[in-house]
Amino acid sequence: MAEEAWHEARLIPTSGINGAEEQERRATSALLAVLSAVREFGRGFVKPFGAPSGAIECFIEVPFVLGERRLYPDGLIRVTRGAKTWTALVEVKTGPNELASEQLENYLDIAREQNYDAVLTISNEIPAVAGQHPTKVDKRKLKKVSLHHLSWSQVLAEAVMQKEFRGVADPDQAWILGELIRYLEHRKSGALEFDDMGEAWVGVRDQVAAGTLRVSDKGITEVVARFDALLRFASLQLGRQLGTEVVPVLSRTEAADPVVRAQALAQSLCATGELSGAIRIPGTAGHLVVTADLRAGKVTCHVDVDAPKEGRATTRVNWLLRQLKNAPDATRVEAFVAHARGSQAAELLGVVRENPSSLVLDPTKDLRSFRLAVSSTLGTKRGRGRGSFIDSVLTAVDGFYAEVLGSLRAWAAAPPKLRPVHPEPPELDDTVPAALASTDYSSQDGTEVSSPDGNSDQGQSRIEAMAESEAPVSGAVDVEGPTDDE
């Protein structure tokens, strides 16, 4: 048998997975085992939920009795530090399976009876807003027990960031974490990527194209929620590659009330056929804004960059061009001036490279900022693959960062320079007191006297004037000559 057909032995094998039940059990056991084995990953996993820094113990399928029923949560996490203990029940779903409200409410009741702190759910569901749970439960059951949710995409992103960027001190533990990453990335693990715009997508898409969509129509709520979930998935995927936390941008009002964001997206979709959102990437010159225009069939990514606050207008344009060496010529560049609505000028980057002054229509106006935008074809299919809406958006986001946003740096003023040291004064004869020989600027004040060659020699003139005005003080003794008594 050829060695190419052999399967390498793995700590967490994907072979032998038959059915959703086996898939969930193996994913739960693999994740919880690595949480207790890899100290850095385990600590980073439970810390956001309020757990203390301590020893982590994990169990699967722990039996509990609720009334007359015997229930088995998928897992349990217990963190102990001294006399303090934090405990959470874990419910896991893999593949397309969704969490059930009744099941979660039962686990919340168990946690309350056992004085546990939280219930944690993990599935492929990505809520539209971070911190929001995808499943509705009775809020009265959350008075003493908190409910948290993680998507498998987020779990995978955290594992990659811990291993590749934050680091794991013990080499064996790093290898164990790498085995978990390899397992979650395998298609049989059930930790799927975002791959569906939902059942309502096709109907809403066709209504947008026909111009008949209304805010009250069925399905629009699901589509806008899926779009925000797609932005979160794009952020997780980009952050996993960059090794940093990339998150969607929300206003305070939208973060406090997700309904506000959903209503704004629904109104925009009905009025203009557009869905848009922004992504924050640490260290970049601005937010990456994504706009999907379903009517025009275009997806556009843009960023707004402040122009330098000094220099001529063409100098500011050249400052921008020096940073866009890898950007495509089809990038649209807009210039905005102070105290004006809209852009002053807009040209393709290829044109601006040949003629930077094409963005300067009025040199007397203060050039305030630039907008860089790249557009590409928007897919319309519901799932993944060629011609899909999801893949076209993900490709546009990754490409815009790689070619445009990743090379931009915000302008910063040059630091102030030290005042130059005044040159050494010419040599003075013995008649000038040493105390008057100074290079300080304060000693150079006074009326300037022109030298014979026409140059001003302010400091030397003052020294000579003071030397000539000196006279013996009355009552002083001339030690070099005889006195009258002699």
Image (spheres, helix red, strand yellow):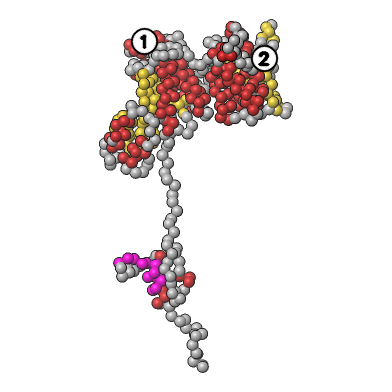
Quadrant hosting residue 3: top right
Which of the two residues, 135 or 344, is positioned nearer the viewer here? 344
For this view, does 260 lie left or right of residue 166?
A: left
Q: Who's the residue at 50% across and 26% down the image?
A: 241
Q: Earlier in the sequence, mark 1 or mark 2?
A: 2
* Residue, disc 2: 60
- Residue 214: image x %, image y %? 37, 13
| Residue 150 painted magenta | no
For this view, does 239 lie left or right of residue 270?
A: right
| Disc 1 crowd, CA 10 A, few/some/many (<14, 14-19, 20+) | some
**Residue found at the very far left of the displayed protein:** 361
Disc 2 marks which amino acid? Ile
Determine the secondary structure under disc 1.
helix
* Residue, disc 1: 206
Disc 1 marks which amino acid? Asp
Task: Report the span colored magenta.
Answer: 454-465
**Residue found at the very far right of the displayed protein:** 83
Whether residues under marks 1 and 2 lie with C-beta atoms below 8 angstroms apart, the answer is: no
Query: Is residue 224 something that shows in the picture?
Result: no
